[in-house]
């Protein structure tokens, strides 16, 4: 009995030791991944600066990061950059929120009802393939050059990734789980909230990431055709004046905004579904 108790204690001690060791390794690997991303960005910027200063040497063809920073500081000091960011940001946020809400609603309707699928499917496919550049002038002509014409363009661009991913996510729900919920007396709405929606969450986040990129592009396209302020308006002014540093200010802000927003969506996704990312930390 004494030997068995000792063996049990020894085995428990051996089994308990690897857990802290594994817990200590995770932060190292996680930090290494972050450092890899940071090194990639810094290396790319240094290469860009070197090419602009010593290879091209003409700001008309290739501006450098330091020239972009200088132009950004001047715009901030003049109060112009804040005005353009607020204008584009307002159009982007309103349009994206509406696109997410409409996309989830339409995707749910298409996934849950075959008649809705038949009725809405051709329209979704047709408008999704329609180039925004072709219809943006018409929308601005109908709705004016105010904020709502840009919001409409953003919604038209960003809603379709949400519709397609929502429908795909809801259709991928395990049928056995749905049948089990029905056996326990759940109605259609309860099945949606308790079974179908949690199953479709990964698809929804994928749709949001795609919608963010399309919404940012839509804001710029809409502002190019008619606006009084915004990053697209600033980009148009810079291109007309052949001011490459000023042009790249808008481009860099849009690129960084897309990167940060996509990262934030990924953070929320990790918080809601941490089990899907445990393999990256092992």
Image (tube, rainbow, N blue to C red):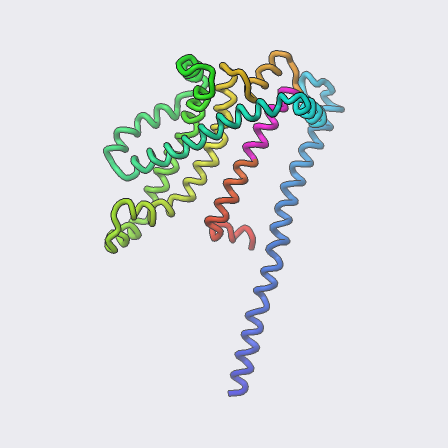
Q: Position of residue 282 (x, y in %)?
A: 56, 55
- Left or right, residue 225 beside residue 165: right
Q: Position of residue 189 (x, y in %)?
A: 28, 45
Q: Nearer the viewer, residue 75 or 24?
A: 75
**Is 15 rendered above or below residue 132?**
below
Q: Is residue 258 magenta?
A: yes
**Is 261 rendered above or below residue 83?**
below
- The residue shown at (65%, 20%) is 246
- Left or right, residue 136 beside residue 185: right
**Is 250 rendered above or below residue 239?**
below
Q: Main secondary structure of the magenta part?
A: helix
- Left or right, residue 255 beside residue 122: right
Q: Position of residue 125 (x, y in %)?
A: 35, 27
Q: Position of residue 204 (x, y in %)?
A: 41, 40
- The residue shown at (65%, 38%) is 40
Q: Nearer the viewer, residue 229 or 210?
A: 229
Q: How many marks?
A: 0
- The residue shown at (48%, 24%) is 218
- Displayed quadrant of residue 135: top left
Q: Nearer the viewer, residue 59 or 221?
A: 221
Q: Is residue 120 magenta?
A: no
Magenta part of the protein: which range? 246-259
Q: Residue furthest bottom?
A: 1
- The residue shown at (41%, 16%) is 143
């Amino acid at each position: 009995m004494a030997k068995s108790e000792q063996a049990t204690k020894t085995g428990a001690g051996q089994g308990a030791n690897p857990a802290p060791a594994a817990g200590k390794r995770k932060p190292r690997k996680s930090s290494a991944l972050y450092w890899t991303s940071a090194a990639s960005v810094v290396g790319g910027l240094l290469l860009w600066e070197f090419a602009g200063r010593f290879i091209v040497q003409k700001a008309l063809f290739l501006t450098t990061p330091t020239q972009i920073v200088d132009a950004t500081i001047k715009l901030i000091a003049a109060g112009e950059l804040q005005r353009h960011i607020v204008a584009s940001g307002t159009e982007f946020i309103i349009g994206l929120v509406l696109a997410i809400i409409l996309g989830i609603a339409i995707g749910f309707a298409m996934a849950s009802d075959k008649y809705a699928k038949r009725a809405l499917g051709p329209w979704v496919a047709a408008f999704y393939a329609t180039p925004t550049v072709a219809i943006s002038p018409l929308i601005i002509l109908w709705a004016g050059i105010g904020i709502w014409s840009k919001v409409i363009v953003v919604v038209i661009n960003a809603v379709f990734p949400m519709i397609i991913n929502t429908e795909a996510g809801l259709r991928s729900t395990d049928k056995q789980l749905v049948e089990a919920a029905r056996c326990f007396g759940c109605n259609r709405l309860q099945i949606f909230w308790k079974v179908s929606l949690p199953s479709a969450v990964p698809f929804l986040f994928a749709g949001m990431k795609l919608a963010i990129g399309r919404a940012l592009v839509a804001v710029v396209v809409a502002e190019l055709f008619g606006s009084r302020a915004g990053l697209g308006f600033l980009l148009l002014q810079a291109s007309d004046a052949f001011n490459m540093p000023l042009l790249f200010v808008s481009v860099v802000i849009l690129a960084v905004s897309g990167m940060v927003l996509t990262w934030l969506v990924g953070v929320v996704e990790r918080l809601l579904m941490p089990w899907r990312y445990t393999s990256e930390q092992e």
